Amino acid sequence: MTFDVITIFPDFFRSILEHGVLKRALAAGLAAIRLHDLRDFTEDRHRTVDDRPFGGGPGMVFKPDPVFKAVAALQAETPGQHLHVILLSPQGRLFTQTVAEELRWQERLVLICGRYEGVDERVAEHVATDEISIGDFVLSGGELPAALIMESVVRLLPGVLGNEESAPQDSFTAKQVGGREFQHGLLDFPHYTRPAEFQGWKVPQVLLSGNHEEIRRWRRQRALEKTWRRRPDLLAGFPLSEEDRQWLATLQREAEVPGRGTGSLVPQPRDET
Ligand code: 9D3
């Protein structure tokens, strides 16, 4: 899979290409990342990529011409091939694991990184075939989003992770259940390693017990509990077993009447208000 990144900061990407999953994928020849300096597609002496916005207002906007030329140069390398051209922008569709799994099937991805107040809208309309945001927070440009997308897509390519099983087990991998696609799984259960006691903080006893059925139940309950507390939105699209529902009902009762719910025999003071 080849990524073509169009950016005014090609050097930004150098260190991330030398670490972790991207380095491994590049070394194994499973992915290639080509960096293209947008200024190389300008024609004026100052290599100008931006200009003031029509209609007034603060900041600068990426001119369309260098972006058009950069993408045209890439298209000219493979004239017949359909190019998937992604504009990174806050107005794009939200990037999720499901989008990563969709993109992994592309032979080639072009990533356009904007900066300043944005990119001339004619790029979104006539050059990009896709527009993606990585979330509702303000960044200064598309470089971090492009790096993030490459990381998440590359680790889905067969052979990139040491363990071939690792990718499909991730908690956000889309699950096909009953013909419906679930965008998310549950949040992960807590993990512990040695020592069994660290600064007085003990590893939950059940994990040391060797009782695998108890461990399985404990992990499932912790995953459900963390998801229910922090990301209840994920539960809406998740296929719950009868045992899951009973545990969630227990948590619900516990929240309504603290101390009841788990069958505590210790009487709790009533809330007088
Ligand atoms: C503070 C400027 N904003 C005015 C209302 C608009 C704005 C323009 C350009 C906000 C951010 C940016 C630069 N961001 C990106 O290019 C970007 C981005 C992001 O900021 N958040 C999440 N995903 C993405 S993808 C590209």
Image (cartoon, grey):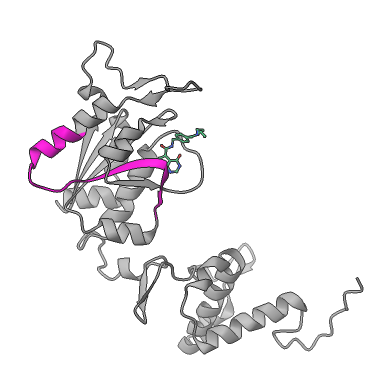
Residue 111 image position (x, y, % from top left): 28, 41
Residue at 58%, 76% (x, y): give it.
204
Residue 118 falls within the magenta-colored stretch: no
User: Which of these two is toward me, 251 or 176?
Assistant: 176
Residue in the foreground of this view, choosing between 188 and 59:
59
Q: Specify whether 252 is left or right of 227.
A: right
Q: Residue at x 60, y 80 (%)?
A: 248
Judge by depth and name the residue closer to the eye, 238 or 1: 238
Q: Is residue 229 above or below residue 219?
A: above
Q: Which residues are magenta?
A: 71-95
Q: Is residue 111 visible?
A: yes
Image quarter for ligand 1 equals top left
Up/down of 261 relative to 42, above or below = below
For the point 57% across and 84% down, the residue is: 245
Q: Position of residue 163 (x, y in %)?
A: 27, 67
Q: Residue 228 lies in what quarter of the image?
A: bottom right
**Side of 133 where 248 appears, left or right:** right
